[in-house]
Image: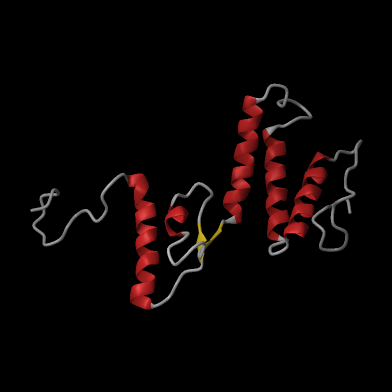
Amino acid sequence: MCEMNIKCDHECANSKGSSGNMESVGTFRIFERSASKRELQYTEYYGVGDSKAFLKVNDIYGENTVTKLECIGHVQKRVGSRLRKLKKKTKGLEGKGKLTDKFIGKLQNYYGIAIRSNIGTIEKMQSAVIAAFFHCCSSHRNLMHGQCPDGQDSWCRYK
């Protein structure tokens, strides 16, 4: 009988250690057996920024053979979280005309648009993030749309 009081011929646990370590162990096992059982090597790992699993598989087939890619949605969410944390920690950032939750949400949304529309070109992505920041800081009295993209496909309503 196993610990669950069920008659069985199996092991109930296939991972030893903390539950936080399970993702790392599972990822390592998948990457490790891909080469031996399927004769293939993964070249990319999709994960969130704080994932420890990537560190386990980064050099699994040789030095730096696996590239880490992140979900844009997670990066976008992290921007908002960090800005909210900064607002709480730093006096003078809160209040009208400053770093409000509504402004952070708007900035976070435009940040995601800037990243998604410029995948593959770091320079354009960087320029689009800066344009999004200025766009969000713009007001009727202080127009800051000089960096915003022109044309019919522009996300800037002013342009």
> In the displayed structure, does residue 9 sit left or right of residue 92?
left
The percent position of residue 114, horizontal first and vertical second, equals: 73, 55
Front residue (pair 96, 61): 61
The percent position of residue 85, horizontal first and vertical second, equals: 61, 32
Location of residue 103 (image quadrant) = top right
> In the displayed structure, does residue 137 sit left or right of residue 142?
left
Point out the residue furthest to the front here: 63
Point out the residue furthest to the top here: 91
Front residue (pair 144, 129): 129
User: Would you place residue 57 above or below residue 89 in this image?
Assistant: below
Residue ID at (69%, 62%): 119
User: Would you place residue 155 above or below residue 39 in this image?
Assistant: above
User: Would you place residue 120 above or below residue 141 in this image?
Assistant: below
Q: How many marks?
A: 0
What colour-coding does the image apply?
secondary structure
Location of residue 18 (image quadrant) = top left
Front residue (pair 62, 5): 62
The percent position of residue 75, horizontal first and vertical second, equals: 60, 49
Q: Quadrant of the C terminus?
A: bottom right
Front residue (pair 94, 36): 36
The percent position of residue 57, horizontal first and vertical second, equals: 44, 59
Residue ID at (37%, 66%): 32
Point out the residue furthest to the bottom here: 39
Residue ID at (76%, 27%): 96
> In the displayed structure, does residue 59 sit left or right of residue 136?
left
> In the displayed structure, does residue 47 sit left or right of residue 16?
right
Residue ID at (46%, 65%): 62
